[in-house]
Structure formats: C-alpha cells, structure tokens
Image (cartoon, grey):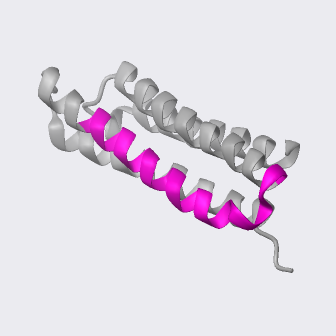
Amino acid sequence: MRKPLILFFCASFVIFGIHQVLYNIPAIQTQLSQRSIIEIHTIIGSLTLLILFSLFQVKRFASQQVGMAFLASGLVKMIFVGSYFFFKFNTTEIEHPKTFTLHFFAIYFFYLALETYLTFRFFIKKD
C-alpha cells in the first residue's frame, strides 16, 4: 500500500508545482486566483486519495471486486466533482469562467489518469 501512496503524493506535488510555476510566470500568468488553484487540487486530490484507500480495503477483503469498485468509485467521484463544479458556478461569481473550467477539468483528468494508472498497476493483478 505504501508504494501507490508515495507515487500518488509525488505525482500530485509535481503537477501542483508545475501549476504554481505556470501561474507565476508573467508571460503566461492565468486569470485564475491562487486560492482557486489550491482549492481545485485539494478537492480532486482528496477524493482520489479516498478512492485509493477504499480500493486498498476492497483488495484486502474481496480482491475479485477491485475492478467493479474502481468503476463505482470513479462514478461517485464524477458526481461529487460535477456537483462541486455546478455549485461553484451557480453560487459564486467567477471572473473568468472559461479559464476556471479549463484548469478544473485539466486537473480532474490528470488525477483521473493517475488514479487509473495506480489502480491497474498496483491493485489489479493478472492471475
């Protein structure tokens, strides 16, 4: 269990660091606030981490069901993230909605790809 978590945290810090470096370069500085970037990474990263922990538990008790648990957890994550995105747009005034949408879904798909890689690499083994 330690290896997937180490890879998850390393990859998360790398993508967050790249995002911060890009945010601070004046030539390509985004119109998105620093708080929004941190909020997006925190929410999506936390959900991904929760899914990895739950897949570890599923593997311990019912290893044949890891694939189904992965699909179900991906659906639940999509619902939570979609709900957050929907409520964020409807309850707060976002200055640059296109920029926010681009950053939000780029980060979402990065964490989704990372979650998929870690699941297939460490949780689903060929018999």
View extreme (bottom): residue: 127
Q: Residue at x 71, y 38 (%)?
A: 9
- Left or right of residue 43, residue 62 in this image: right
* Picture residue at 71% right of the left edge, 40% below the top: 53
Stretch in magenta? 60-85
Numbered disc total: 0
Q: Quadrant of the C terminus?
A: bottom right
Q: Name the quadrant containing residue 18.
A: top right
Looking at the image, which residue sits at the far front?
Answer: 62
Give the vertical position of 64 relative to 104 (above or below). below
Q: Position of residue 58 (x, y in %)?
A: 73, 51
Tell me which residue sits at (15%, 22%) in the image: 91
Q: Is residue 28 magenta?
A: no
Along the line of sight, the residue nearer the viewer: 80 or 59: 59
Q: Position of residue 110 (x, y in %)?
A: 50, 53
Residue 83 on the magenta span: yes
Q: Position of residue 75 (x, y in %)?
A: 43, 54
